[in-house]
């Protein structure tokens, strides 16, 4: 009888355990990867008035922003894809990347780099793009300061392109940004461009352009669609040397994957 009561209490405690992700984040179709873990995309969700749109693929994801970390308070709790958070494992939370995803995180303040497995949702703080486990943050040398400016690049991500999601609102395009048609791009074949990034998500590409346009020197930022890839470019520049000058500015600002191209 005592054993039965004890088991009942333990089951009640487990069922009441808090989760890492907000109530508005809806779970959806679950599959299993050969590598282990649960594959999840999830529905669009809203936190503090901000909408987040989980990606169907993390391919070509490359973004610079602020990283934070979470530790003992969440140790042992459930992550957004149903796993158990382990603060000593090399994992991370991201607002939109498919789960699981392997990403390389580079601390732009000291050059240290780690590979982490995204299995959670967050951080829901303005300008922060990834929430690292204690172990990952320690390896990057950011425990003391709490945050660091980082670059996040996808190495491999789960394929959730066919996963059905519900209630995904259609993103409203930013009115100040227009897409460059492929025909227009061909008209400037001899012009030089500086490409800053390539995305499988139009939403992420537009978001980067909006951020760049906050600076006058990046006012020529635009999205050029080639097939299903959305490329963020500056230009066109009349001469390659002008593009090279802009490339130097961008790389010094942390956009180290930028390159000069000719279309």
Image (cartoon, rainbow, N blue to C red):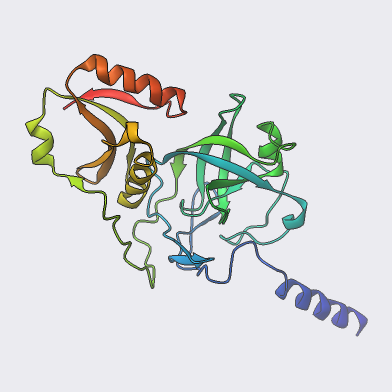
- The location of residue 146, given as percent across then percent down, is 69, 41
Residue 76, image x and y in percent? 74, 57
Please provide percent x and percent y for residue 55.
40, 54
Q: Quadrant of residue 237?
A: top left
Give the answer, above or below, for where 223 lies relative to 218: below
Relative image position of residue 163 (x, y in whole percent)? 38, 63
Position of 253 with respect to 93 (left or right) is left
Picture quarter with the C terminus: top left
13 sits to left or right of 156: right
Residue at (31, 62) in percent of width and height: 172
Name the quarter where the N terminus is drawn.
bottom right
Numbered label tally: 0
Q: Which of 229/194 is in front? A: 194
Residue drawn at point x = 28 percent, y = 37 percent: 221
The residue at 39%/72% (across/down) is: 166
Q: Which quarter of the figure has residue 85?
A: bottom right
């Amino acid at each position: 009888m005592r054993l039965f009561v004890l088991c009942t209490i333990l089951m009640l405690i487990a069922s009441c355990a808090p989760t890492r992700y907000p109530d508005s984040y809806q779970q959806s179709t679950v599959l299993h990867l050969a590598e282990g873990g649960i594959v999840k995309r999830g529905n669009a969700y809203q936190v503090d008035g901000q909408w987040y749109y989980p990606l169907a693929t993390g391919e070509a994801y490359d973004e610079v922003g602020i990283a934070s970390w979470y530790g003992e308070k969440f140790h042992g709790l459930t992550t957004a894809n149903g796993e158990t958070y382990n603060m000593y494992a090399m994992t991370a939370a991201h607002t939109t990347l498919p789960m699981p995803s392997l990403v390389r995180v580079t601390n732009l303040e000291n050059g240290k780099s780690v590979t982490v497995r995204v299995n959670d949702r967050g951080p829901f703080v303005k300008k922060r793009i990834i929430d690292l486990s204690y172990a990952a943050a320690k390896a990057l040398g950011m425990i003391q300061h709490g945050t660091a400016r980082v670059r996040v690049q996808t190495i491999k991500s789960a394929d959730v392109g066919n996963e059905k999601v519900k209630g995904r609102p259609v993103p409203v395009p930013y009115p100040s940004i227009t897409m460059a048609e492929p025909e227009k791009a061909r008209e400037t074949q001899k012009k030089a461009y500086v490409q800053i990034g390539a995305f499988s998500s139009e939403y992420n590409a537009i978001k980067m352009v909006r951020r760049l346009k906050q600076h006058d020197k990046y006012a020529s930022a635009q999205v050029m669609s080639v097939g299903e890839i959305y490329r963020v470019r500056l230009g066109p520049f009349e001469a390659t040397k002008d593009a090279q000058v802009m490339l130097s500015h961008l790389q010094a600002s942390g956009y180290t994957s930028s390159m000069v191209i000719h279309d």
